[in-house]
Amino acid sequence: MKPILKQRGASATALLAFVLFVALLYVLYNQSSIDGFFTSRPENVVPRVVEARGDLSAGEKSVVELFEVSKGSVAYIFTESVQGQLFFRRVAEGTGSGFIWDDAGHIVTNAHVVQGANRIRVQLDDAEEPLPARLVGIAPSYDLAVIRLVNKPANIRPIPVGTSGDLMVGQSVFAIGNPFGLSKTLTAGIVSALGRTLPVSNGREIPDVIQTDAAINPGNSGGPLLDSAGRLIGVNTAILSQSGTSAGVGFAIPVDLVNEIVPQLIERGALPRPGIGIAVADEALARRLGIRGIAVMGVEPESPAAKAGLKPFDLQAGVVGDIIIAVDRKPVANVLQLSKALEAIGVGGTANLLVMRGDETREVAVLVVDLEVR
């Protein structure tokens, strides 16, 4: 039995020696960690000293001043619309932007921001809570609308109005609005292009639109586009983007057009609708009939068209009517082109129509009237 005890004692001694050897290696290779563990933390640690930056650059100062002066003229619009049937109604909420137009409390925005809204509220810069507003006038063909504060504060600041007639590609522009519900948001950019046309929902096009790379996102709609002097030069209205967010291609309605339309909306609630009192064939029917031009399908009694002797088609009776092929010697091929031509002439003006009936062509002078006035 004694030899066995000696063998076991030797094994235990060898094992203990091996453990001590491993522990020694661990200490040697991890000395830095152990030192760090037993080292005390430094005392009286203080924040870094802030270095003075000096004055803002002249450009930065001008942008800061522009925002401070302009923000009081910008409105942030919140809408509620009831949708659905009696037992399945839901309230859809929307946001947009606008700006104070005059001392009477009129606010200009996009038509698509407030169209169909059952409730409109407006948050101004220095107001504690949103203020109720009502719709005054709307022009969907130009995506413009005017609302008015129900209880106008005493200290409102109308936005300074500039002109879009002397804009140049490359000049600085600034947009203030309510993107994604984030009010008082300023973005900057340049005029990227001029003279664009922008389609709207009713098939019409807004002319002379300003293109900008200033970030315009959902909620910016209806807000002001400003020049470096803080003057209104456009109304932000749309973006060109596959994602629905800013991709550097935004559009604004030119202020010169806005300045023509807004007074009419305030005075009348709608724009005049220049016309001559006819119904025309749609493009699909005209193509089926092989007609090039605008086929007159109906003439209102006592209208300027009736007085000028225009004659409608009667397909059932096989009666050939008039086809309008030009207005003031400019060709027209569809109702949109005819509408634009009559708008250019204006209510009270005379449209010189080139009309074809069968194989005969003649000129007819027709008075342009407001079709909204009956």
Image (cartoon, rainbow, N blue to C red):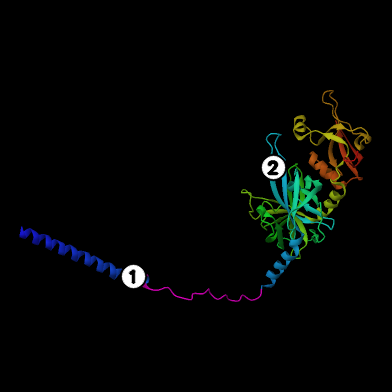
Which quadrant: the C terminus?
Answer: top right
Q: Is residue 248 above or below residue 19?
A: above
Q: Is residue 63 above or below residue 82?
A: below
Residue at the top extreme, as displayed: 317
Q: Which residue is label 1 attached to?
A: 34
> Picture coordinates of residue 32 (x, y %)?
34, 71
Residue at point 85%, 52% (across, down) = 263
Judged by its main secondary structure, the magenta piece is loop
User: Closer to the N terminus: mark 2 or mark 1?
Assistant: 1
Q: Is residue 207 visible?
A: yes
Q: Secondary structure at mark 1?
A: helix
> Picture coordinates of residue 276 (x, y %)?
88, 39
Residue at point 55%, 76% (across, down) = 49
Identify which residue, 309 or 267, lies in the foreground. Answer: 267
> Picture coordinates of residue 191 (x, y %)?
71, 59
Q: Amino acid at mark 1?
A: Ile
